Image (spheres, grey):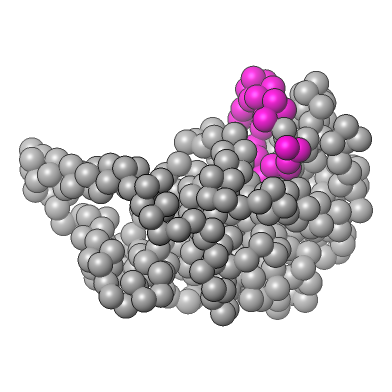
Amino acid sequence: MAYIDPHIHMVSRTTDDYRRMAQAGCVAITEPAFWAGFDRSSPAGFYDYFRQLTDVEPKRAAHYGIAHYCWLCINPKEAEDPAFAREVMKLIPEFLDKPNVLGVGEIGLNKNSRNELIILEEQIELAKQHDRLILVHTPHLEDKLKGTRMTMDALINAGIDPGRVLIDHVEEHTVAEVLDRGFWAGMTLYPDSKCTPQRAVDIIECYGNERIWINSAGDWGPSDPLSVPKCHVEMRRRGHNQKLVEKISLKNPLTFLRQSGRFVLPEHS
Amino acid sequence: MKMPQPSCPLTSKQVVDIYFMEHRAKLLDIAAFLDRLERAADQEGLQDVRVRALKKAIPLLLDSRCENHANRVRQMLELFSDHTTEPTPAAHTQSALGADPNTEY
């Protein structure tokens, strides 16, 4: 079945992963800008990263018939120094007009600090000025509940239409509030943290299939670029029909991403 | 948000048949982790906030309040969470523990 993985960090993955994802039915991916596992020493490091996201990865993906789109930002883990973060943010408008850039992301909070919040608010403003979609990273583990609420408050206070924002990494304690406030929700399938495929299907069964998607968020840590099709298997073995699988992994991502005016599925899909 | 009606298409017998072995293994892993902790060379880890939070979470598995609403996962995640509302003054670390270090577990 053709599917979209709407959140994966292919800069951290091998070409073999592109091949295996294509074999499993992946036709398009979107790649948010994120933390590389270390703090970059200069804004120039981000400039090259943005070139990699907008120029290099789309070519790697195209070899396997996968459409590649991206999101740009400075991630919250490197936002504690506002002066540095603002230098990076100055680089972003140059890239935002490229046809494969869907919006600003993955912005958000990490430790829910004052400086992280300031930079989050400034990046929300950047998206607003350029009329771009927003992809939100919510914090890890014990920081998620508080950070998700703070982020949603910042978005609403800025006058952003929640229907143009995807709040990612939701779990059982955050999903209801995200959907209730009109945002889109993303479930990340990880082996140890966030959601397992089983829990993601539980959440769909409990909270419905509107404004929600699944993604692998495959990166340099414990993660699985094939977790999305593995979640499809979990849905089928419980007796859910193919329409639900397509809704979660094709129709819903298409509905959200097409709001960018840029996202197009490859013709072969 | 109003919880929808139960929507898992499987019968309860099918749920047991499909998932029991997987979760039996996970339960044994927790038991083995606690045993390993007690056999460790010192006792310091026994007071670690993560262990204290884990021990407080385990009874939720059999909490009748959870049983009636099938929301054990949510209750556990809320137990592990920071419930303050003001921004923290500064981020002194980039990582998270898995349990709130400022909560008395």
Q: In this picture, is A78 found above or below B71?
A: above
The residue positioned 54% from the left and 35% from the top of the image is: A224
Q: Where is residue B42 in the image (x, y as percent from the top left)?
A: 8, 43
Q: In this view, does A143 lie to the left or right of A107?
A: left
The residue positioned 66% from the left and 62% from the top of the image is: A209
Asked if the stretch drawn in magenta spans residue A5, the answer is yes
| Residue A58 seen from this side | yes
Q: Is residue A202 left or right of residue B38?
A: right
Q: In this picture, is A232 found above or below A207?
A: above
The residue positioned 70% from the left and 73% from the top of the image is: A182
Specify the quadrant that holds the C terminus of chain A: top right
Q: Position of residue B58 (x, y in %)?
A: 24, 61
Q: In this view, does B75 lie to the left or right of A97?
A: left
Specify the quadrant that holds the N terminus of chain A: top right
The boundaries of the magenta stretch are A1-24
| Residue B89 seen from this side | no
Q: How many numbered marks, from 0 up? A: 0
Quadrant position of residue A95:
top right
Q: Is residue A110 left or right of residue A266?
A: left
Q: Where is residue B61 in the image (x, y as percent from the top left)?
A: 28, 64
The residue positioned 68% from the left and 54% from the top of the image is: A244
Asked if the stretch drawn in magenta spans residue A6, the answer is yes
